[in-house]
Amino acid sequence: MGCGSSKVEDVDDWMGANDVLLVTQQTGSLLSSPMSLFVSKYANSNITTGRVVSIEINDKKIGLKMTLNSRGLTVFAREEDKYRFKSREWASFGLTPGSNPGLYRVPSSDFHVHFTIFNIHYTKPLILVDLDAHKPENWERDYVPPFYGLENDLDHIIKLCHKLVENEDKQIVYLTDQVIVWDNSVRDHLFEKYQNKNGYSMPLGPVILRQEGAPKKFERKPRVPNMYKKKFLKDLLELNVTIEGVYGTNPENKAVYSKVDIADETLFFGPSVFREKCIELFDEDDLLQAPIEKDLMIEEADELKRIDPEGEENPPEVDEDQNLDQIQDQTEEEQEDQEEQEASKDDEGIADEEKPEESDLQGEVDIDEDKE
């Protein structure tokens, strides 16, 4: 898709918005998750920092406007509540319970992005679904949107999500570490392609994505996995909601929920957890076929697990605050140690091969230093 045109159909992959969860508190006040629109600098040559963004809710234009900051995010021009409406402002919009369509628009261009406001009461418990089955670092550097990681056990995933909220007494929320500019693609999978499968459908709910643009094709440093997911979870808990359960197929993503003090007994992660919970929660025969082939990315994650001498699995602990360059340096040092060991073995029984000139080695060092 082109990025110089002002036509929205040409720049769809350079902008996106998260949905908003609005919660009525016990006191009657209204609290919400952030209003998060992202516009890449490539989205439209006519859109620059400071551009006014108008908002429409339920097809009605509201008086309050936002502006685009230097990061491509929308903010209100005030010291407090820069990323969300205040309680009295929400109350003035006349929202109905359930879903309310919203629209961001830049009046000076054809640019606009759809989102949805989900208006619920604080007594309605939440079901969180983590959409990331694949390891984020395996697709962070890809230029095209990745697979969504749900196909490995798709029938059971759709069935469980459908049945958990079919009485409309719970609200489902979808979280993914995929970038926000792929919001339309993610919603299309959930609410168009994943509908009426064996009589079950993915229920409507807020979709929350990483508040960044598409990764560059040859990005040098990987992005920190689940960073924005963790930030949203902290915002979510400030809405005084009850999280009844969190479900996901990748066990490695469980840690981000534990670290924000969501009870461990509500966290259900594993390649077959959706199938298992279908049988456990609803006490019925599982008529759906179990997945035959295990997802290759999950297999790869399993192989990376460490096994101690006692035979117990010990996943390596990762310090999120550790410098990424330091991690890379450690990896290079381990590789050098391994190469030295192999070289010493060769010296014992194999004749030395012709060594490179010292000038050639210096050239390689210079190149590595330039990269750093």
Image: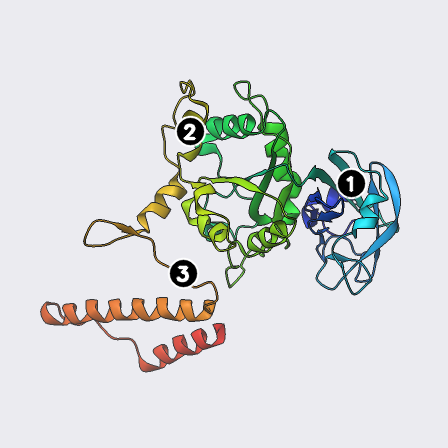
Residue at 85 percent across and 53 percent down: it is 65
- Dot 1: few (<14), some (14–19), or many (≥20) neighbours within 10 Å? some
Q: Is residue 179 visible?
A: yes
Q: Earlier in the sequence, mark 1 or mark 2?
A: 1
Q: Are marks 2 and 3 in contact (CB under 8 Å)?
A: no
Locate the N terminus by quadrant.
Answer: top right
What amino acid type is highlighted by mark number 2?
A: Arg
Looking at the picture, tell me which residue is in the foreground, 120 or 223.
120
Residue pointed to by mark 3 = 318
Q: Is residue 2 above or below residue 199?
A: below
Residue pointed to by mark 2 = 275
Total number of numbered labels?
3
Residue at 55 percent across and 54 percent down: it is 230
Residue 270, given in percent of the width and then of the height, sits at 40, 40
Q: Earlier in the sequence, mark 3 or mark 1?
A: 1
**Left or right position of 321 against 87:** left
Q: Is residue 143 above or below residue 101?
A: below
What amino acid type is highlighted by mark number 1?
A: Gly
Secondary structure under badge 1?
strand
Secondary structure under badge 2?
helix
Using the numbered discs, state the Cα–Cα distance from disc 3 to disc 1 in whole angstroms.
39 Å
Q: Which label was assigned to residue 102?
A: 1
Which quadrant of the structure image shows residue 58? top right
What amino acid type is highlighted by mark number 3?
A: Val
> Going by the picture, which residue comes out furthest to the right?
63
